Image (cartoon, coloured by chain):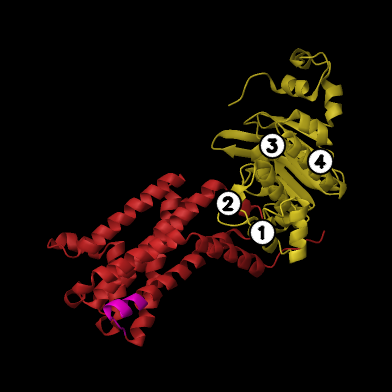
Chain colours: A yellow, B red
Amino acid sequence: MIDQPGSSILQVKNLNVFYGTFQAVSNVSFYVKSGEIFGLLGPNGAGKTSTLSSVEGLLKPQSGEITVAGFNISKQPLHARANMGVQLQATSFQPELTITEIIKLYAGIYGVNLTSEKLNALLQDIKLEEAASKKFGQLSGGQQQRVSLVISTIHDPILVMLDEPTTGLDPQSRRQLWERIEAIREKGHAVLLTTHSMEEAEAVCDRIAIIDHGKVIATDTPQGLIDLYRNDPAVISASRKGKITLEDVFIGLTGKTVRA
Amino acid sequence: METKIPKPSDAFLSLMRADFTTQWRNRRSVIMSLLVPIIILISWKGLIAKLGGAFVFSIALTIGLTSIGMMGYAISVARDRDKGVFQRLRVTPVPTPFIMMSRLLVQLGMIAVLTLGVFIIGYRVDKIALTPAGYILTFITAFLGGALYLGFGQMIVGLIKNAETVNSTTRLVYIAFIMLGMFGELSDNMEFKNIIHWSPFGTVKTILAAAMQPVTWNNDATLALVATLAYALVFSFLGIKWFRWN
């Protein structure tokens, strides 16, 4: 039984996803509250993307219930999607369109009235005024992530989902993105992010869930998880510098074997 | 909680604007779709007296339609699927069928441009003029023929998941269609001629040729029309059934 506070924006209950006979997600349950950054951590193939895809409505789970802002993703997908902003892991936009055109397209899709002033302010905010007429593929990795985040949040959604948003970014771009993610939280919105970076999870997440073999094996604050598992022999054995870190807890709980 | 669902018409217009811009920037593909029919109209000028204007017009239009359905539609859908463009759109509150409807409307626009282009070049270069009823009927049959090739393109992207393989397959099929369509009916082998006549290329060519001269519309043209519609339905059904968004 999971704790479900009244302010939860996203609720996932007993989610099960199968690919043929392979169970990718097994009875996963969690919630994300408003004003909270919730991290979903797990090794490759643990079930993170399947879980996220189910929440986004890209994947139809075999069972379970997902609600976004009170709307069931299976029964009211358009309402649920209107309340979420999504940054996919391997996302791309039409390569022929300029940044301005891409932003206008998504503003139109979300029914946002985007005046020239608003558009300029958006571009200024992400420091891309000069690149407004460039194509998405001509931008650097950091610039692409900033455009993706602007598009994900253009309609001011109450739930923002980010799938490994800082992968491949340099430290400066990563810090800048963290600040942007924290700014979303400051507005009282909820953020669900997946990451492989324990540093990122510790730095920005209020709570995290560790998922492995399709199951949630631990959920708590980063410090709460460290405190809870610091005496676990597997965690101690994973520790490299004597001091227990979130990465030690993660390795201790999910094992040292490299996943495909 | 109150949720603002964007108006479907606004979302659709935004999608269409983006798709038309994409098509416009892909001018090479547009030119390719128009170039081969125009080359046929110009290079076959001397054959018009022998084969008839309707025959040359219908060949040029059918090849253009094949190019739009396969080179234009199928390749762009396969590429965008591969790049994750569709997945990005599918997580928005736009109804999923809108994504494809917008794409198809752009291709219908292309068919209109192609038909007009063939009419204009045919009139200016080959002095081929149709009756008003012929122009209208040709427009309608061009859209029906276009539906067949768009369905064919949809079937290819439904069957083949890899964008590179879609690219090479459509080019191969396109060349095969051109060769068979242009020269198949000139063959002396009746059986081969019959196969070409009832192939997707042949049926579209037959209805286009008949539409250009409405007085010549006969039972054969009606059967070709039925076959065209059947091909379009079967290809579209299979293409939609097998299609995967990612």
User: Residue A78 in magenta?
Assistant: no
- Label 3 marks a residue whose chain is A
Q: Main secondary structure of the magenta part?
A: helix
Closer to the eye: label 3 or 2 = 3
Closer to the eye: label 4 or 3 = 3
For this orientation, the residue located farthest to the left is B188
Which sits earlier in the primary sequence, circle 3 or circle 1?
1
Could you say which is closer to the camera, residue B115 or residue B125? B125
Tag of residue A185: none
Residues at discs 3 and 1 both on one chain: yes
Q: Amino acid at mark 1?
A: Thr
The answer to the question of whether label 2 and label 4 lie on touching residues, with beta carbons closer than 8 A, is no
Closer to the eye: label 2 or 4 = 2
Residue A38 location (% of width, % of height): 79, 39
| Residue A161 quadrant | top right
Which sits earlier in the primary sequence, circle 1 or circle 4?
4
Question: Which portion, as a residue range, is magenta?
Answer: B120-130
Q: Amino acid at mark 3?
A: Leu
- Label 2 marks a residue whose chain is B
Residues at discs 3 and 2 both on one chain: no
- Quick one: SS at disc 4? strand
Query: How far separated are the C-alphas under marks 2 and 1?
Result: 17 Å
Query: How far separated are the C-alphas under marks 2 and 4?
Result: 27 Å
Query: How far separated are the C-alphas under marks 1 and 4?
Result: 29 Å
Q: Which residue is mark 2?
A: B85
- Label 4 marks a residue whose chain is A
User: Residue B121 in magenta?
Assistant: yes
Q: Which residue is mark 3?
A: A169
Q: Amino acid at mark 4?
A: Ile
- Quick one: SS at disc 2? helix
Q: Which residue is mark 4?
A: A37
